[in-house]
Amino acid sequence: MHLTSKGYSNVKLQRSGYLAGIALTATLALAACGSDNTAEPSGSNASAAPGSCSSGSLTAQGSTAQKNAMDEWIKAYQAQCSGAKIDYQGTGSGAGIQAFIAGTADFAGSDSALKDEEQKQADAKCATGTALNLPMVIGPIAVVYNVDGVDNLQLDASTLAKIFAGKITKWDDAAIAALNSGVKLPSTAIQAVHRSDESGTTDNFTKYLSKSAEADWTFGNAKAWKAPGGTGAAKSDGVASQVKSTAGTISYVELSFAENSDLKTAKIKNGAGEFTELTGESAGKTIEGAKITGTGNDLKLSIDYATTTAGAYPIVLVTYEIACEKGSSKAADIKAFLNYTSSTAGQTALSELGYAPLPASIQSKVATSVAAIS
């Protein structure tokens, strides 16, 4: 059984060489919810199943960056776990966190780990435990553009910062031309598009700019867009649609949305001086070097955007699931579902949707943290 969700069948499959090697594993992902009364697929790697199903219902919301991943996971989980019902709405990271704190979401998806004040509020919601930040989806951030005749655009952090800060306004600017020798750039105006709603994607993109182009980006990082000018578009699909339909535009959006809309993506210069194409593999190389800054079972990550790892693509976000470690009335249901999403089968199922599987070192830590939910 092929797991690609309806509507994503046209997603490009040639992202990286390792996809062919894991294609068979992807077909086995539905086995991940196996329970005592669920037949094991003939010939499957049943030992990879993350545990028993839960037949309860869950309500969750948040990150639009992980919405495509959630749709795929929910489809697979509910197909194998009789009675399970999971509703995930892509309302944006900020809205998801607030819903979790208010108690209207059983867990939340967020493109950024909880800030200190949010953490205090979330911990209080969990009553007898701590709110965990569980990295679950690597959502590479593509720099997408719509410029006639330009198919292999190359950019670095400084030039990107100047474009989104409104300091570079024409496509044939000398700074862009210097990075794209031999490319005929038009003199048309640049239209920079940003998220109009609060978004962890914006938080991560501006964090990259603030850490990699400090002299040219003076607006810090936040879920809300702070720089003047540009055009706002709501949610990831709105950004992709705006770029797709408007010549001269440039923006940032998760790879899954870029590929689903067949948008051009720029190569980005990394800390090793390479202009790197965005693939699941190149994004994974950056996450492999991330440091865990959380304590205990909390797995907040600090990403090195200046990574010098060969072949690493530097603009990467990790989307988290925010869940109570203890004290939730839905603990068993949450644990069962996140057991699946963090399993090898669950992670492999994402590869064809424009995401990168968690590196093994991170995946094992997430599985341990999920096992502690009670």
Image (spheres, rainbow, N blue to C red):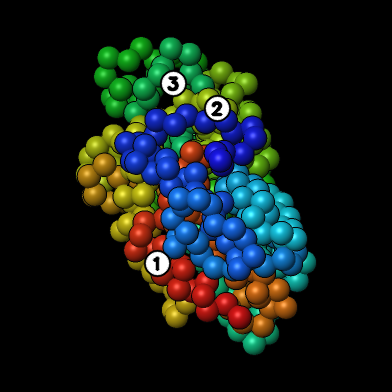
- Residue 340 coordinates in the image, percent (x, y): 55, 60
* Residue at which label 3 appears: 171
Check disc 1 and give the amino acid type.
Ser
Q: Secondary structure at mark 3?
A: loop
Secondary element type, mark 1:
helix
Query: Which tag is nearer the camera, tag 3 or tag 2?
Result: 2
Amino acid type assigned to the residue bearing label 2 in the image: Asn
* Secondary structure type for disc 2: loop
Kindly identify the amino acid type of the residue bearing the numbered disc 3.
Answer: Trp
Q: Is residue 352 above or below residue 87?
A: above
Q: Residue at x 46, y 52 (%)?
A: 44
Q: CA distance from mark 3 to mark 2?
A: 30 Å
Between 70 and 252, the one lying in front of the other is 70
- Please report whichever mark, 1 or 2, sits nearer to the chain's N-terminal start: 2
Q: Which residue is mark 2?
A: 10
Whichever of labels 3 and 2 marks the residue nearer the N terminus, that label is 2
Identify the residue shown where x is 73% and y is 55%.
87
Q: Quadrant of the N terminus?
A: top right
